[in-house]
Image (cartoon, helix red, strand yellow):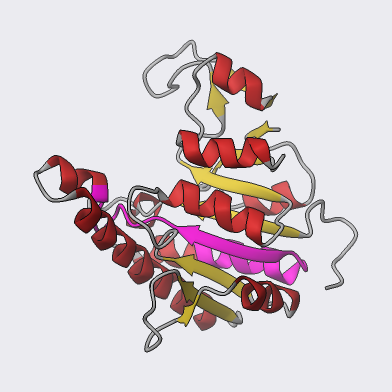
């Protein structure tokens, strides 16, 4: 696919948490927030960047939380996977309402509402300029949606994983708890491990490290950040 010369990345994987879709609510999907994220994603697509998305399900159900309350972990994780499909359907609808061409693929078969995940088909959609949303995590319990994002990014040969969060990068400590926390503009995989910094769960992080796939941690709630990143500006923290 041809893309404008100003863009730094040809193909990206955007990881959104389910909690991000709540906006100011304590549960569920906040419509204005959903459509704001959709507009930002569509802007990248219109720049010619091939965009894939993984959305978490924590705004509806978290497998770990269910397991902590006595539910079987595998059973709880499958429920969490279904929550990611609900979020994927909502994001797909928001994108299509703004004129985007979008496909939702699920790692768990549910052909009535979305395509099965097939790597070659996903890549072909991207090459045709369609936004692809990956739902249901990896399709297996005991793996997070961070791990699903890393795995899918490697499979589709994305140039970078963009992890949208509430904070604007990786800090020496939690900036919401420590006013003296210092932000990194860039940091190596080795230094993240040495300093025990929280970027992704260890399985997801190791997948990126072993496959030399860079990660950018950034604040998704600043509406210009996604565009600035793909245009090559320094935003958030680059882990590479």
* Quarter of the picture holding the C terminus: top right
Residue 220: give x, y in percent of width and height. 53, 47
Extreme residue in the top direction: 180
Residue 21 placement, left or right of 37? left
Residue 166 placement, left or right of 183? left
Extreme residue in the bottom direction: 112
Query: In the rendered structure, does residue 131 fall within the stretch colored magenta?
Result: no
Q: Residue at x 69, y 69 (%)?
A: 45
Residue segment shown in magenta: 37-63
Residue 69: give x, y in percent of width and height. 10, 43
Q: Considering depth in this image, is 131 or 229 the residue closer to the camera?
A: 131
Query: Does 234 appear above or below 139?
Result: above
Q: Residue at x 58, y 22 (%)?
A: 192
Residue 72: give x, y in percent of width and height. 15, 50
* Quarter of the picture holding the N terminus: bottom right
Extreme residue in the left direction: 70
Residue 9: give x, y in percent of width and height. 78, 54
Residue 197 placement, left or right of 227? left
Is residue 135 visible to us here?
yes
């Amino acid at each position: 696919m041809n893309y404008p010369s100003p863009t730094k990345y040809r193909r990206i994987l955007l990881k959104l948490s389910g909690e991000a879709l709540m906006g100011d609510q304590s549960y569920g999907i906040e419509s204005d927030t959903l459509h704001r994220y959709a507009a930002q994603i569509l802007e990248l697509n219109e720049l010619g960047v091939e965009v894939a998305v993984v959305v978490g399900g924590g705004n509806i159900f978290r497998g770990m939380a269910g397991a902590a309350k006595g539910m079987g972990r595998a059973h709880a994780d499958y429920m969490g996977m279904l929550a990611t499909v609900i979020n994927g359907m909502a994001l797909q609808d928001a994108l299509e309402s703004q004129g985007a061409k979008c496909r939702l693929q699920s790692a768990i078969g549910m052909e009535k509402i979305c395509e099965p995940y097939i790597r070659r088909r996903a890549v072909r959609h991207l090459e045709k300029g369609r936004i692809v949303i990956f739902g249901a995590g990896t399709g297996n319990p005991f793996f997070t949606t961070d791990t699903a994002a890393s795995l899918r990014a490697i499979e589709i040969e994305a140039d970078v994983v963009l992890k949208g969060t509430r904070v604007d990068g990786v800090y020496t400590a939690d900036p919401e708890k420590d006013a003296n926390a210092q932000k990194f503009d860039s940091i190596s995989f080795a230094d993240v491990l040495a300093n025990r910094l929280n970027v992704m769960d260890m399985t997801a992080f190791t997948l990126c490290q072993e496959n030399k796939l860079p990660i950018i941690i950034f604040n998704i709630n600043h509406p210009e950040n996604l565009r600035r990143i793909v245009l090559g500006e320094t935003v958030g923290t680059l882990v590479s």
